[in-house]
Amino acid sequence: MAAMPDEAVAAARLVQEDDTSTYLDRVLAGLAAASALMPRDPEAGVERLDQAHRTASVAGDAAAIALASAVRAEIGPESEKRAVPHLGDGWKRVVKGLGSSCNQIDSTS
């Protein structure tokens, strides 16, 4: 989806609007949409990051909160790099992948 940001945002919207999606589905969709939006509409991307973090916080899922925080640190406007000790290697690869995806979209614009 890295080369298809409009499709990524549309797919995330479908997940957000689906009554059967779980909070984790919505968190992951929001983070993916944020990654697609950041290069061309940072304000909308930050809104998606904030929404994903709120969803994780309401659920009380420490791993989802850590994931949302890590993605924000990776692709957010301040892009503060920091260690994320609460995430396993698999989730850290997801964070790096979203960052790479975001950078790839930015370089093709």
Image (cartoon, rainbow, N blue to C red):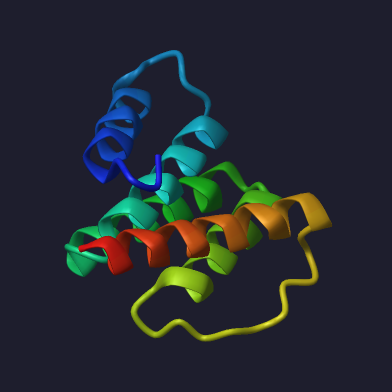
On the rendered image, what quadrant is the C terminus found in?
bottom left
32 sits left or right of 69 in the view: left
Q: Residue at x 27, y 39 (%)?
A: 9
Is 32 placed above or below 82 here? above
Quarter of the rendering containing residue 15: top left
Is 1 placed above or below 42 here? above
Is 98 placed above or below 33 here? below
80 sits left or right of 109 in the view: right
The residue closer to the viewer here, 24 or 76, is 76
Residue extending furthest front? 108
Q: Residue 54 placed where, x, y %? A: 43, 53
Q: Residue 58 placed where, x, y %? A: 51, 47
Is 79 placed above or below 67 here? below
Q: Residue at x 37, y 16 (%)?
A: 19
Q: Residue 31 placed where, x, y %? A: 44, 50
Q: Residue 76 placed where, x, y %? A: 39, 73
